[in-house]
Amino acid sequence: MMKNFVLPEYFKPYTCSNLIRIGKNNDGGYLVDETSMIKTNVLLSFGIDHDWSFEENFYLNTNCLVHAYDGSVGLIFFIKKLKMRIKGMITKPNKDYFEVSKYWFRLPINFYKFFNVIKDKKGPNHYEKFVGNKKNFITFNETLENIPIEDKKIYLKIDIEGNEYSLLNEIIKNEELFTGLVIELHEVNKNIKIIENFINLFALKIVHIHINNYGEAKQNKLPDVIELTFSRFSNSNNIGGNLPHSLDQSNDINSWPYKIEFLNQ
């Protein structure tokens, strides 16, 4: 069933003629401004889980340094997943389960093919740490200090399941470093004032908005999860355009499609 959303005016993106899709189909892929990507020498990524298609695709297009942070992904993560799959293949010996399990058996091989086992200056590097201000987390500023490049031109990608709000002030403080930003915003209704303030203060312009249909969609409410793309290099003063974009894809192919309108305030 089609969902119709009316979003506040400040979400309306500036027109961008060179949006391209980076990452895999459906969940895990994002639309970015190609100019932002080309002018980048560092991709700084927070949150990958079991999908680094965005990071890999970005790297193949730019050959830039990649630093990815996710404390939930590492050797123990892969061992647990493989043990669970082996157990399942014994207790559920059917073809469908076996086919899905093949993905999980290939996953650690693909992970260590892309990310360096031993960190080096050229990358791509994965750091088994969460980013934020909590105990045992690495701070946002420490991730910047960890980049061995003096003239940093950073593309920032954030998908950290609600912890993104703790980083917004630091993003604004360091905005001169960023060529672009893709960020997944969770619990939008609860955090709408924080989001509005960030959009109004951040120097980069919104060039795309996408609704993640894995999130909830309650009547007369904003969508629960929204993905925003920002660019430093949008020269357009025109706002709007048809949404969803022709390159957009549903995160969940079995869930609801949507249309977006914007409310004048």
Image (cartoon, grey):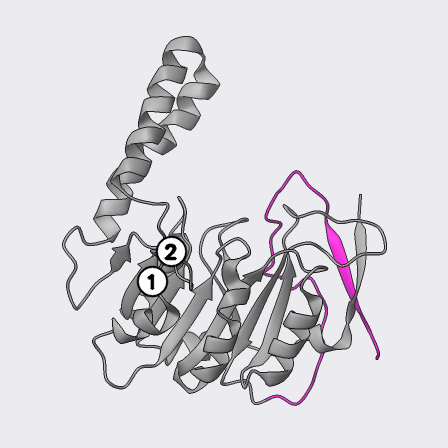
Point out the tag, 1 or 2, that comes first from the N-terminus.
2
Compared across the picture, whether 192 is left or right of 205 comes to right
Compared across the picture, whether 160 is left or right of 14 comes to left
Residue 138's tag is: 1
User: Is residue 93 visible to us here?
Assistant: no
| Amino acid beneath label 1 | Ile
| Residue shown at the point (68%, 54%) measured from the top left | 224
Residue nearest the viewer, comparing 119 with 52: 119
Residue 60 found in image quarter = bottom left
| Residue shown at the point (56%, 82%) measured from the top left | 202
Q: Is there a contact, CB below 8 Å, between mark 1 and mark 2? A: yes
Alpha carbon of mark 1 to alpha carbon of mark 2: how far?
6 Å
Residue 97's tag is: none
Tell me residue 93's x, y (percent). Answer: 42, 10
User: Is residue 261 visible to us here?
Assistant: yes
| Residue shown at the point (60%, 84%) measured from the top left | 201
Residue nearest the viewer, comparing 55 with 45: 45
Residue 237 lies in the magenta stretch: yes
Q: How crowded is mark 2: few (under 14 residues within 10 Å), some or many (20 or more)?
A: many
Counting labels gives: 2
Compared across the picture, whether 262 is left or right of 172 comes to right
Q: In this view, does 120 lie above or below 14?
A: above
Tell me residue 145's x, y (percent). Answer: 27, 75
Residue nearest the viewer, comparing 213 with 81: 81
| Amino acid beneath label 2 | Phe
Q: Is residue 14 above or below residue 3?
A: below
Magenta stretch in the rendered image: 236-265
Badge 2 marks a residue whose secondary structure is loop
| Residue shown at the point (62%, 50%) measured from the top left | 250
Residue 130's tag is: 2
Residue nearest the viewer, comparing 64 with 11: 11
